[in-house]
Image: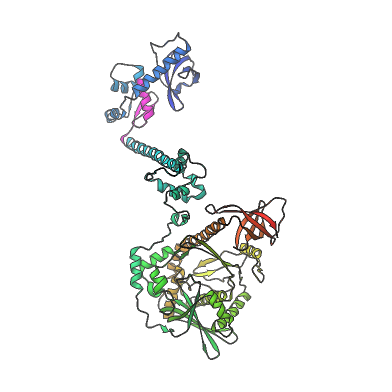
Amino acid sequence: MSFRKHDIVDYFDTRRIACGLILEVDEKRLRILTDQGKEASIPPSRALIAAHDPNFPVAGSRDAQVSRLREICLQREEMKNSIDLPELWEVVSPETSEIGVRDLTDLFFGNEHDANRAASLLRAVHEDRIYFRIRPDTIEVSAPERVEQALVQRTRERERREFLARSAEFLASLKNGPGLEIGAPPPGLVAMLEEAAAAGREWGEVKAAKDIFVKAGLPPGWNPFRVLVKLGIWSEDENVTLRTESVPVEFPPEVEERAREVSTKELPLSSEDLSHDELITIDSAQTRDVDDAISLSYEGADAIVGIHITDVYHYVDEDPLLHEELRERATSIYLPEATIPMLPPILSEEAASLVEGEIRPAVSILVRVGPDLQLKDHRIVESRVKVGERLSYEEAADRIADRASKEAVLFRIAQALRGARVSAGAVIFKDPELSVYVTADRTIEVKVRERETPSQILVSEMMILANSLFARFLHDRGVPAVFRSQPPPLEKIDLGEGYDPVLSYRAKKVLSRGDIDTQPAPHSTLGVGLYTTATSPLRRYIDLLVQGQIKAAVRGTPPPFDVHQVEQTIAQISYRLERATTMERERQRYFLLKYLEQRRSQEFEAVVLQRFPRFYLVQISSLCLNAALMASSTLSLNPHDRVRVRIDKIDPREDKLNLALVRLL
């Protein structure tokens, strides 16, 4: 392309094609007067077309020249809009892959040459970029497959822009407050909002959602979660993790039906009849899925302690449909606002639960204890049992206070068991147990219960005994199982006599991580050489699997799971177990913060756990809740110091709780 002084040139100017008058030409640059009335210097490579305009006022004023440039630019834009590139492409593409600018111009406009026509065509091609592409000295004709792909992409981009515009308009209507009638959200908006809300504080990384909020002019306090609540799609207390992790809540109809079918299975006649033994269950008042019961009888001077675990495997057996569903769930999840059971309630709360007065199949371990409270021997049997009495922890504690009661005898045995474990290195944490419940009317109830009550000790020691004996039973017979272990702590732990929040906090920081594996190893925190879990088959799939292995070993038949299948199960459900634990912890803390939010005016006693550079970590004594105490840099506190605090900042949804100091105690 050649350039002459006073030619009119179309050139690339950032995002548009501009029009200019060439004022001076040298080898490397063109000095031009732009249609914006400014002089500029451009490389020749940015020029698209240059030609003489016989009507240009070369000798006229600068204003007249700029006016003519704008007139030419407008003419070319109007002509551009009349060019049908798809039609041109249909004619040209079967014949060639490239074509000259003049040939393509003549094909559309006719043979009468006009610089404005060629320039308008180049503008159309540059703007479209689908059917043709501008190349040096020629125009590339796009291949059909490229055109098809580009048209699909253009359609998607157009739909995206329309979606963003409709969504922004919709959200802007929400911002304008109540009283305005708001229609249904655009299709796809709710799903996008849910995706963004699932990202929590990082929701802005979902770019489309961020663009919509900016376009809608929503203030900083607005976010996808708030919009979903405002629309009534999510509740104020929505469990986002439950949604994002796709945790199964409802049971599929076919699983419910199979559970109903197996719930009526006949009790095994080959099992040992222990239904005349006096069994008791000890649980909280809210518990409906009762896994375990205990009993006490005598043979001469020896006490026979019975630990009876409901035989869930009797119902589930090797049913592939039920096992697939239970593996997917892995565990029951206990949230303040709801329980997500592992088993359908017809099994977990009815047929397989140790309901008072009903005969149930069980796996019983009968332990002989001598007058010196030492274990002599034990045997494991399949059994039929009947619970004679259901006790709460409080009722059991009252019975234990009567030294002549069987509960008191069981407690003394439990104390001996605990003493043996402590001698073997067991660590006994004495942290109070915190329970948070949300009632039907959305009232939040918080209870703090001492974990080391006699009834709590009785139950926990019996379950630890049963699980350790089950582990030994399976290991001695070479039956594959899921064993739990934990290496020794990183340093010696001393928790003192009573509950000390500082010592407990420090001890948890030096505990080694526990493990589950098919290879047994000692469990240092429990102080036992071998350990499994088989005492909660209604609530944990691993316990159900181990129960199936135990039953096979008792019968002397091949186990339902070989070692490879056990390893596969561990790999499959380990994440789900961690997910459930995390969700339980997060939801308890969320509702606990909501509980505190309703009591912002109150003051609380707290104990200092640790000093950090910018804050102190303290524990609110009445709730066993750790939080940050923001204090002046001139204040010097030490672990165990007691303080009076108030709530400074709190946001349950953001998991934020900052305390302010009221005074030292």
Position of residue 39 measured from the top left corner of the image (x, y, whole percent): 50, 17
Q: Residue 138 colored magenta?
A: yes
Q: Residue 542 colored magenta?
A: no
Residue 647 placement, left or right of 544: right
Residue furthest toward the top? Answer: 59
Position of residue 144 measured from the top left corner of the image (x, y, whole percent): 31, 35
Colouring scheme applied when the structure was drawn: rainbow
Position of residue 561 measured from the top left corner of the image (x, y, whole percent): 42, 71
Residue 582 placement, left or right of 134: right
Nearest the camera: 329 or 437? 437
Kindly tell me whether residue 190 is visible in this rendering: yes
Kindly tell me whether residue 5 is visible in this rendering: no
Nearest the camera: 626 or 490? 626
| Quadrant holding the C terminus | bottom right
Q: Is residue 290 above or below residue 506?
A: below
**Residue bounds of the magenta highlight:** 118-144
Residue 457 placement, left or right of 637: left
| Quadrant holding the N terminus | top left
Position of residue 167 measured from the top left corner of the image (x, y, whole percent): 41, 41
Residue furthest toward the front? Answer: 179
Residue furthest toward the bottom? Answer: 300
Q: Is residue 184 above or below residue 409?
A: above
Q: In this view, does 113 lie above or below 298?
A: above
Q: How many marks?
A: 0
Nearest the camera: 387 or 375? 387
What residue appears at the point 41 percent right and 66 percent down from the top-left corner?
326
